[in-house]
Amino acid sequence: MSISQSEDRFAAFRHAAYTKFFLARFLAAFAMQIVSVAVGWQMYAVTGNALYLGLIGLVQFLPALLLILVTGTAADRMNRRMIVAICLGVSAVCVALLLALTIGNAFAPLPVLAIMTIFGIERAFMGPAVQSLAPNLVPEQDLANSFAWNASSWQTASILGPVAGGLLYGVGPLAAYIVALVFMAAGTLLVLLVPKPAQRSANEPKTWTYLLAGFKFIRHEKVVLGAISLDLFAVLLGGAVALMPVYASDILTMGPMGLGILRSAPGVGAIAMATFLATFPIKHRAGTIMFIGVAIFGIATVAFGISKVWWVSALALAVMGAGDMISVYVRETLLALWTPDQVRGRVNAVNSVFIGASNELGEFRAGTMAHLIGPVAAVVVGGVGTLAVSIIWAMTFPKLRTIDTLEAPDKA
């Protein structure tokens, strides 16, 4: 028998383990945003070469792709809480190394890229573990509520973190790294304070069949395949983040402050929607609502692309963020409910790579098309493509479209 979703807006926080986990994730995400801003600014100040900024992102993404079979297996066979704690501890060490390089006036591309590669490795392991740990900390009826708060936490860190990073870097890079180090260390401690939760694991031999179980499950479970691939192609086509500097500078003539407004707008919309969903969870027609969310994302992308008025553009970006949050809320809840705990780590490893690929390749797609046909056309074409994907996927995955409630499927 399925368990209905909780009506309590703060249901997830009624569980002490989740509260510690939530605070740890927020502090870690906030710290990483500070580090990203500080490292980017400092690298460009030292080298004057934008190529190194691209390499910083690349060395953090590649480990997730190259280690996909290892990271998912680790999350399924080992203590997920301890994996997250170790990864956050490694992150704290990396921040300390950046601080040491800065103090010693030794900040240079090679050592920094090596440190960021270590960041990428720990994030590759932490992604599947942290996504798989969350469902172990709350009962089934509070899962959707916890995912809404998780998403809100990440979006808040994404908005406030870069601002804090910029202000702290204005004081000095040492200030930025010291605050990030304190936050990362606090996050590590909080995770260690989370009691070890129950976790199902299968004592299967580490054969290729076991290692590839995540891919096999996704291929055969059409609900999960449809949800993950929908996000991949929707973000791949609809991403406009890479072109925001062009819009702020050349199209909307807003200047650097305007760029900050544009970058924050999607997060504002996402937080507002996440708060709404935590208060009024989706009760019925969840699959259809997810596709509507993706369609809203695409339509808002087109509106942003053609707008010449800054406040209209900012509003369109906020709507984009809200539409994306609807999709994320439903997709992540379905992924947790439809994936058995013993294979969850390997499935989330694949999901993490898909998310990373959609973001990285989406920026590449937008930049390349902008070079060929102009930024406005690139954004509009991408938005239309996202709208088309929502329609095509709704027809291709009818089981996903017709899902009614965000409850565990009846496997009987």
Image (cartoon, rainbow, N blue to C red):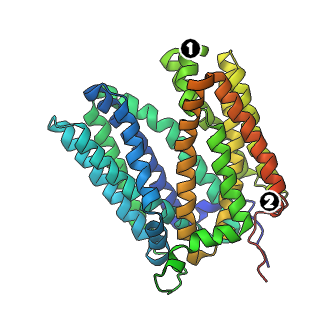
Residue that sits furthest to the front in the current view = 372
Judge the density around disc 2: few (<14), some (14-19), many (≥20) Cα neighbours within 10 Å.
some
**In the depicted view, which residue is nearer to us: 241 or 258?**
241
Question: Total marks drawn?
Answer: 2
Determine contact: label 2, label 1, CB under 8 Å.
Answer: no
Mark 1: which amino acid?
Asp
Question: Residue at point 76% right, 34% down?
Answer: 299
> Residue 256 appears at what percent x and percent y?
48, 19
Judge the density around disc 1: few (<14), some (14-19), many (≥20) Cα neighbours within 10 Å.
few
Q: Secondary structure at mark 2?
A: loop
Residue that sits furthest to the left in the current view = 104
**In the depicted view, which residue is nearer to us: 63 or 316?**
63
Q: Which residue is mark 1?
A: 250
Dot placed on the residue nearer the N-terminal end, 2 or 1 = 1
**In the depicted view, which residue is nearer to us: 275 or 326?**
326
**In the depicted view, which residue is nearer to us: 388 or 21?**
388
Q: Where 230 sits versus 386, above or below?
A: below
Mark 2: which amino acid?
Phe
Quadrant of image for the C terminus = bottom right
Question: Residue at point 54% right, 30% down?
Answer: 367
> Residue 340 appears at what percent x and percent y?
63, 75
Quadrant of res 107:
top left
Q: Where 75 sits versus 264, above or below?
A: below
Q: Which residue is mark 2?
A: 397
